[in-house]
Amino acid sequence: MKMLVDEAGNVWHTQAKREERLRTGVKGAHMVMPFQCELCWMRLLEGRDIEPEDTTYNQCLRRANLDAMAGKAKGTIDSHRGRIKANLLRCKELGKTPTFEPRGPFPNYDCVGMGTAVDIIYKSITAKGKICDYVQVHTLRMERSTATKVYESSPKGMTEGYSFAKGTGRIRPTSCNLQSEWFSDFLRGLEYRMGSESRSNRAITMKAMKEVLTRIKRDAESAETSEEGNQLYKVGAYLALITTCSLRGNEGFYTDLLGLRKYILKGKDGVIPDDLNQNFSEDEAASLPHVVVCLRGKFKSENNEDYHIMCVANKTRSGIELRWWIEKLLSITTDEGRDAGPAFASRAGNLASSTDYDAVFRVYLKQVQSDTNLIQDDHDVDMHYGISRTPRKSAETRAKQAKLDDSMQDAMNRWRTFENARGGRPKFKHTRDLYADAVAYMPLTWSYSYAL
């Protein structure tokens, strides 16, 4: 008989056993976790008894209790119960009052987060999910963070908001019931019961990405109108940029048009020496064929809009010609009369829609899947691919194939953290100084992008 072991350490031999575990409580669970029946919770939360119209509410209360029990391994509960029982027998023989804390009465308020647990349970059976019929556990967890933020901003919570920590972490005591051990057990049990289905973007090969770009370029050249062709060129430039720079989809929209124009001639006529090694000097870096990518925006954990610059290869080993795409993008924006603002924008200067770019990307992925063997036939393009992660994951996959050092991949994929760690540059630093810094980072950024 096949044995199954879940993340909580529970062992199951059949599906029926697992279902029984989720439908029933565990003997002795009330000794290792706070437990109150549905009637007690109804009186505590609503100040009344259970009414006939409370059927669903009552079921949510019971389900939350059972999920909290499932958050602890049955074996752990049984073990504690056994030791407690043995201790009580010894106390009886000795004539001693047991030292264990009494099991009641409980405080006359929700001290474990049952109210929010009921909210989560009800949402799980009524809300429609994006990737399947029901909402995912990771989405349900957001209810906890939202309720926590409401508590922290309340008159009671704001008095607990003071803390000091000399380091990266921050610890502060709180009375927020959503931080209770019971609620953590409930979330673990909820995930164990519901499971989770992930449809994160998959990678494609650099050959497939190049084929996508080739088809976009071909269709742009033969487009019926210049507006249609220019839109395709913009999408192609966007895909080439976020792939070569290993950016997440949203980060590409930070590309700054003025910065691209200012440095477009840098590295245009660079030459790769035959004896180039990874530890090349700053002078050697400046003479390499590269394109300067300028990102500008208010990034997470920053207070002001800042520039972030990276120098990457004009053309990757697989044939992605980033410089060609960037120069084409600049030509289009010149015709539109734009010389500043977001690089990927409409003629009027409004930031492009990621949804629109994603839709175009998937159209061409489906073409490549249909006409070639570069994308597996059994992969659902709409489900498994998109600009959010596919270009970056494709770059990561190619970097692994090229046997680039893991530290180089990690630093490239955390480009802003890596950059800031190299000296803590001041805010509003002049772009020429940032460019000099970017050249110094080229052993990382150029080597990574060139290997793709």
Image (cartoon, rainbow, N blue to C red):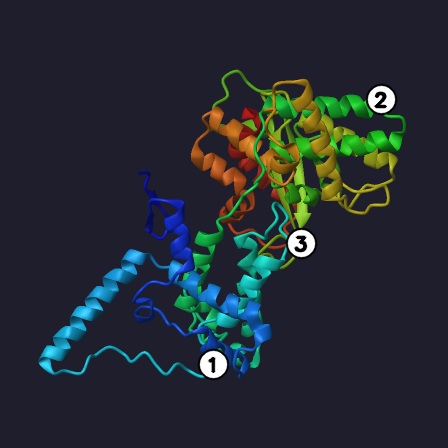
Q: How far apart are marks 2 and 3 (CA)?
A: 39 Å
- Residue 342 x/y as whole percent: 75, 44
Q: What residue type is labelled 1?
A: Tyr
Q: Which amino acid does label 3 sit on?
A: Glu
How many tags in the picture? Answer: 3
Residue under label 3, please give it. Answer: 305
Residue 305, picture quadrant:
bottom right
Distance in Å between CA atoms under marks 1 and 2: 70 Å
Callout 3 secondary element? loop
The x and y percentages for residue 422 are 50, 46
Query: What residue does disc 1 label?
Result: 109
Residue furthest to the front in view is 52
Q: Which amino acid lies under the numbered mark 2 shown in the image of this protein?
A: Ser
Relative side of 173 to 118, left or right? left
Q: Indicate the quadrant containing the C terminus: top left, top right, bottom left or bottom right.
A: top right
Mark 1 or 3, nearer chain start:
1
Disc 2 versus disc 3: nearer the observer: 2
* CA neighbours of label 1 inside 10 A, class few (<14), some (14 to 19), many (20+): few
Q: Is residue 315 above or below residue 441?
A: above
List x then y, in percent, for residue 269.
67, 22
In the rendering, at what x and y percent does residue 81 appear?
25, 66
The answer to whether mark 1 and mark 2 are in CB contact below 8 A is no
As drawn, 428 above or below 98 = above
Secondary structure under the numbered disc 1 in the rendered image? loop
Residue 159 in the figure: left or right of residue 23: right
Q: Which of 234 and 179 is in front in this view?
A: 179
User: Can you tell which mark lies on residue 222?
Assistant: 2
Do we see residue 315 in this rendering?
no
Pick whichever, 100 or 256, lies toward us: 100
Residue for point 61% across, 55% down: 427
- Give residue 27's mark: none
- Residue drawn 89% across and 26% down? 224
